[in-house]
Amino acid sequence: MHSSILFLGLATAFAPLSNAHTVFSTLFVNDKSQGDGTCIRMSKEGNVSTHPIAGGLANEDMACGRDGQEAVAFTCPAPAGAKLTMEFRMWADASQPGSIDPSHLGPMAVYLKPVSDIKSDPAAGPGWFKIWDEGYDPAAKKWATEKLIANNGLLSINLPSALATGYYLARHEIITLQNVTNDKVDAQFYVGCAQLFIQGTAASDSTIPADKQVSIPGHIDAADPGLFFNVYTEDATKYTVVGPDVFFPTSPAATNNNKQTSSNQAQQQQQQQTEGLIPKNCLLKNANWCGTEVPAYTDEAACWTSAENCWKQLDECYHTAPPTGSKGCKIWEEEKCAVIQKSCESSSFPGPSNKGEKLGGDKVDAPIPGGGKLPAAVNAGAAAGDGQEQGQGQGQGGGGGGEVAATPTSAAAAAAATQTKTPVTSRCKNRRRDRRQRRRMN
Ligand SMILES: [Cu+2]
């Protein structure tokens, strides 16, 4: 075993090769990719998008990361109980492989926060509850971050099955302890959020118990021993994850279910997603931007108007492209705008020639690492427990009915730990990386 000093020396020596940090790049709902960057609040600056949060525990970036107070255009629909998968990358645009450096040992957690207005409700502040966490898994002999690496940077988690319909922020938290030594204490926080519209099953007026809610920032005590844990010298099996207890609202008991009146159910059905929908007429999506068809033209003047419309959309595409990339913009530029411009120049009407055609296909987003198979949910089986409403309704006391153990079932853990490694092939697929994006990334 290396001494911590030698280990840190090596880490420093390798530092220039890679930032070695991590960013939440891609959301999957029930195994379906929503597209790189889609529905995800991410730092707009490529060069810091993978960096840990700066400014300490009280910084509001602790909620959803840098620029995390600002909504993105799209909000992804997900039914209650859905399997979410978050992909983490060392390089936001997947131009190089890797999810997080193996030196970055530590716990992970996932939080939810219901919001009434996904566009304007602040991410920072009260209303958050933690639905899962994991520190060190003694069965797998791995920290949560090591299991993430073994899963090609993919973390799957089932949403609670008993949630009220509405808008939510889903937040990940990775705390890495590689810089916590006897000489210095510098736990790193990597956080990010996805915007969700959850089609729920619980009563529309059901709320998360006050004692299960926390404010972020403010959910972690600066003196929590979990931030001072020396991963090089201490016994990892003794590690306790920082922050609040897990609260996982599951299906209410049948008796409680029957109490849900038909009017309540009607309310549930009435509440539909109105904000953040991906337009039906979307021809090409890059993260949280969609290209839509330009006006049809039959003469040169109208052609130039349509070309202008196309370039304007393109500007918006590049302008909004997050650090995950702008390959979709490049495709829009080459396969839409340039084609229209050429038709204007050569007086080739009517147009556009590829009217209504979807563009981009599977060339916009990076391939799923590890061959496309997503890992099992870390909390698979957790939903079998009692719902919080059942616990309260039957007066069992303690309010712990909805809680689940912090450690996932060993079956799920074993399955998660045995995923195959990422082949180093994604590099070649990014040769066409756009120059503008490259400039932005530098
Ligand atoms: Cu790092």
Image (spheres, helix red, strand yellow):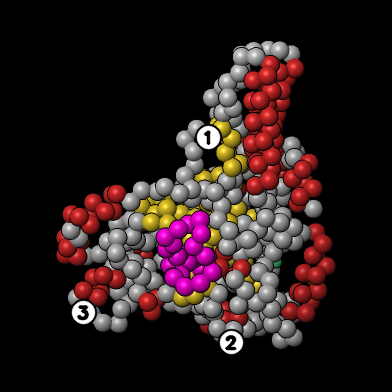
The residue that disc 1 covers is 282
Residue mark closest to the camera, 1 vs 3:
1
* Residue 20, image x, y percentages: 72, 62
In this picture, is 95 found above or below 283? below
Report the amino acid beneath label 2: Ala
Q: What residue is drawn where x is 69% and y is 82%?
A: 185
Mark closer to the chain start, 1 or 3: 1
Residue 223, numbered circle: 2
Q: Does the magenta stretch mainly form a helix, a strand or a loop? A: strand
Q: Helix or strand or loop: what does disc 1 sit on?
A: strand
Query: In this rendering, is residue 130 above or below 439?
Result: below
Q: What residue type is labelled 1?
A: Cys
Where is mark 3, residue-wise? 395
Q: How far apart are marks 2 and 3 (CA)?
A: 35 Å
Q: Please count the marks in the image.
A: 3
**Viewport quadrant of the N terminus:** bottom right
User: Could you say whether the residue bearing mark 2 is in a helix, strand or loop?
Assistant: loop
Q: In the orientation shown, which residue stands out farthest toward the front?
A: 301
SS for callout 3 = loop
The answer to which of 138 and 135 lies nearer the viewer is 135
**Residue for point 68% across, 19% down:** 301
Q: Judge by depth and name the residue closer to the eye, 416 or 328.
A: 328
Tell me the magenta residue range.
109-131
Residue 82 position in % (x across, y down): 39, 53
The span from disc 1 to disc 3 (Cα, nearest Å) is: 51 Å
Report x, y in % for residue 413: 47, 63
